[in-house]
Image (cartoon, grey):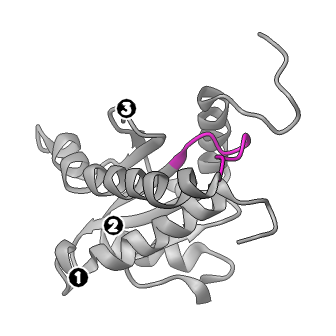
Amino acid sequence: GPLIPQGERTPEQFLEEHDQRLASHAYFSKVLMLRGSPSQAPIALYLQKPQVETPNWQAELTAAHLPWFEALEREFRNTLATPLGLKRRGDIPLNVVCVLQTQGDYVNYAGALQNSMGVSAWGAFERRSRWTVTFHGGGKSPLVERRRGILHEFTQALLHAHLGAGVV
């Protein structure tokens, strides 16, 4: 293919690297993550395959999560990035969100991280791997109550994708 400047990634290259990071990750190497349907926004949604599949599980998880990330990305772009002249980093052409099935899965994920001290109860932006992780069901708090914490983590991911490597 055409030569790409050092650090620049096409979405396809970025997702290929992402898949490799998943495969070598302490937690994600042990669970099956499927890429969700494409988004109009620069977002790639990955969904953990449930132990028991219902016919519409992918569509249900996508509908419960993706519109919120898309809305926040649009708001971030319109309110902050465009007026401030912030350009998306060439090495992060899109943001990856991994949705685990249950709170138990999320607790296991957090436990597999070397530094799980900074992991919030409802979502985590893992800077080194450049993905945001959250979960769909389980636990005492319904998704509507967890949404703010999840979107807070995704905001960190958006900032990271638009500011220089050492800034956030």
Is 90 magenta? The answer is yes
Q: Is residue 63 in view? A: yes
In this figure, which residue is indicated by the disc labeled 3? Answer: 38
Q: CA distance from mark 1 to mark 2?
A: 10 Å
For the point 48% across and 72% down, which residue is it?
Answer: 153
Q: Position of residue 123 (x, y in %)?
A: 43, 73
- What kind of residue is marked 2? Phe
In this figure, which residue is indicated by the disc labeled 2? Answer: 135
Is 30 magenta? The answer is no
* Mark positioned earlier in the residue sequence (3 or 2): 3
CB contact under 8 Å: marks 1 and 2? yes
Q: Is residue 28 above or below residue 13?
A: below
Q: Is residue 138 above or below residue 9?
A: below
In this figure, which residue is indicated by the disc labeled 1? Answer: 139
Q: Secondary structure at mark 3?
A: loop
- What kind of residue is marked 1? Gly
Looking at this rendering, what residue extends furthest in the front direction? 83
Q: Position of residue 145 (x, y in %)?
A: 21, 81
For the point 62% across and 74% down, which residue is it?
Answer: 113
